[in-house]
Image (cartoon, rainbow, N blue to C red):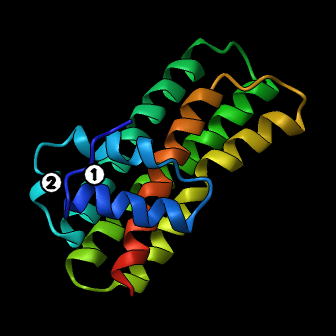
């Protein structure tokens, strides 16, 4: 467990967002922000921007993995179709997350939340394709991690709206 400093923005924010979402893990939230040196000196808007950066970075990482899997998948298989669906969804997610960051910078928090909510679906839609075809997804770990990161971004953005 992490030793929380009294009045520390990261610990306070993570505690608040974890209390509001049973699927958001407090320790993961703290871990995520602790990996960015400026987090503990940021304000809430700064944490939102930092978390959006992590979400974009992670979505791009998943896209890289998808592209590698597509190259290795022979022919026109259902698995390749799912990978292409995943690629489209993550491409859209990166764009939506970037738009969310711009919206936060401009103080348009409602727009940011809408964009982040839309981007949040990328992993579920990806996994659903494999499930529908009774195929083991090669992206489950990536999709789960992306969902965890995106959940933090969405929750922090929601705090800005209060």
Q: Residues within 10 Å of mark 2 (few under 14, many from 20)?
A: some
Say whether residue 50 is left or right of residue 98. Answer: left
C-alpha gap between disc 2 and disc 1: 16 Å
Observer able to see residue 47: yes
34 or 78: nearer the eye? 34
Q: Is residue 47 above or below residue 104?
A: above
* Image coords of residue 6 (percent x, y): 20, 59
The residue drawn where x is 54% and y is 68% is 20
Say whether residue 38 is left or right of residue 156. Answer: left
* Image coords of residue 24 (percent x, y): 54, 53
Q: Is residue 48 above or below residue 81?
A: below
Say whether residue 11 is left or right of residue 122. Answer: left
72 or 76: nearer the eye? 72
Q: Quadrant of the C terminus?
A: bottom left
Observer able to see residue 96: no
* Image coords of residue 9 (percent x, y): 22, 62
- On residue 40, the disc is 2
Which type of secondary structure does the marked residue at label 1 adopt?
A: helix
* Image coords of residue 73 (percent x, y): 66, 15
Q: How many marks?
A: 2
Residue located beneath label 1 in the image: 53
Q: Residues within 10 Å of mark 1 (few under 14, many from 20)?
A: some
The residue drawn where x is 29% and y is 64% is 48
The residue drawn where x is 26% and y is 49% is 4
Q: Quadrant of the N terminus?
A: top left
Viewer-nearest of labels 2 and 1?
2
* Lower position in the chain sequence, tag 2 or tag 1: 2
């Amino acid at each position: 467990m992490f030793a929380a400093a009294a009045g520390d923005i990261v610990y306070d924010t993570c505690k608040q967002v974890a209390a509001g979402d049973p699927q958001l893990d407090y320790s993961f939230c703290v871990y995520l922000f602790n990996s960015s040196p400026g987090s503990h000196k940021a304000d809430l808007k700064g944490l939102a921007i930092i978390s959006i950066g992590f979400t974009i970075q992670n979505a791009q990482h998943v896209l890289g993995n998808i592209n590698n899997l597509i190259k290795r998948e022979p022919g026109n298989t259902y698995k390749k179709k799912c990978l292409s669906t995943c690629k489209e969804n993550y491409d859209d997610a990166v764009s939506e997350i970037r738009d969310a960051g711009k919206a936060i910078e401009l103080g348009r928090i409602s727009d940011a939340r809408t964009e982040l909510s839309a981007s949040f679906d990328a992993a579920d839609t990806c996994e659903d394709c494999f499930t529908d075809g009774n195929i083991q997804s090669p992206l489950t770990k990536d999709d789960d991690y992306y969902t965890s990161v995106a959940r933090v971004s969405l929750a922090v953005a929601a705090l800005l709206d209060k």
